[in-house]
Image (spheres, grey):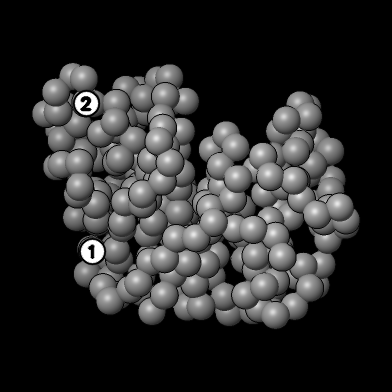
Amino acid sequence: MLIDIWRVDLSSPIPGDGAACLSIDEQDRVSKFVFERDQQRFLRSRVALRYLLASCLNCEPNQLGFSYNEQGKPALSGYKFEFNLSHANGLVLIAVSGGGSVGIDLENIGHISDWQAVAKRSFSPAERTALSNQPAELQEMAFYRIWTQKEAYGKALGEGYSYGFPQFTVMSRGEADAGLEEDVKNPHHPDRWSIKSIETKAGYVAALAHDQGRDVTIRQQNFLYP
């Protein structure tokens, strides 16, 4: 099984007519952003997503249709093809797979100013203990390692934060640890699900969650328009 993770630099210009591939709904979402910077980041991330998925499915970017569940997770209409997207500042990660569920999360270190409060209300007791056991100067980084794992898992399940973040525990004992230790709501999930820390550029932390078994190849590539 193969999962591709594509890195998209939002400072790269889109093709001259690239925005024409967006649906009316996507164009409307672009117009609702107050700031030009946010408009451009959303527009460029959606155009890149369409071009990327179209290249995987051998179709045109404007031929793709999306549906959304109650929590807003997108899915491709008419294709059994899994993908998930996460962005932070000017960087986007897109995970794609031909089968199974995937979730990816990317965080810019330092952007969550109240991370201690977030940990208190969102981490399981075991995660809070692991966090407090870290030296003070390492606790913020440890928070982001745990948080990205939890976000990736929630997104892969299609429920996000509504799944109940304190109800499951990710591996959080050390810098290299990643995985699902316990899920109170679904006790069998640690045997089925994998969570991996993803190498990315300096200043960012990322994680990938999937239910595609242990024998999975994860490949990272930079996205470039054709």
Q: Earlier in the sequence, mark 2 or mark 1?
A: 2
In the picture of the structure, the residue carrying the numbered disc 1 is 190
Q: Viewed as shown, does residue 60 lie left or right of 96?
A: right
- Look at label 1 and name its amino acid: Pro
Q: Which residue corresponds to the image point at 67% horizontal and 49% vertical from the top-left? A: 45
Classify 214 as above or below 35: below
Name the element at disc 2.
helix
Residue 148 appears at what percent x and percent y? Answer: 38, 44
Q: Viewed as shown, does residue 177 lie left or right of 68?
A: left
Q: Quadrant of residue 68?
A: bottom right
- Tag of residue 138: 2
* Quarter of the image where the C terminus is located: bottom right
Q: Which residue corresponds to the image point at 23% horizontal and 26% vertical from the top-left? A: 139
* Quarter of the image where the N terminus is located: bottom left
Q: Which residue corresponds to the image point at 19% horizontal and 49% vertical from the top-left? A: 177
Q: Residues within 10 Å of mark 2 (few under 14, many from 20)?
A: few
Residue 192 appears at what percent x and percent y? Answer: 28, 71
Q: Viewed as shown, does residue 134 lie left or right of 36?
A: left
- Look at label 2 and name its amino acid: Leu
Judging depth in this view, the residue of 80 and 204 nearest the camera is 204
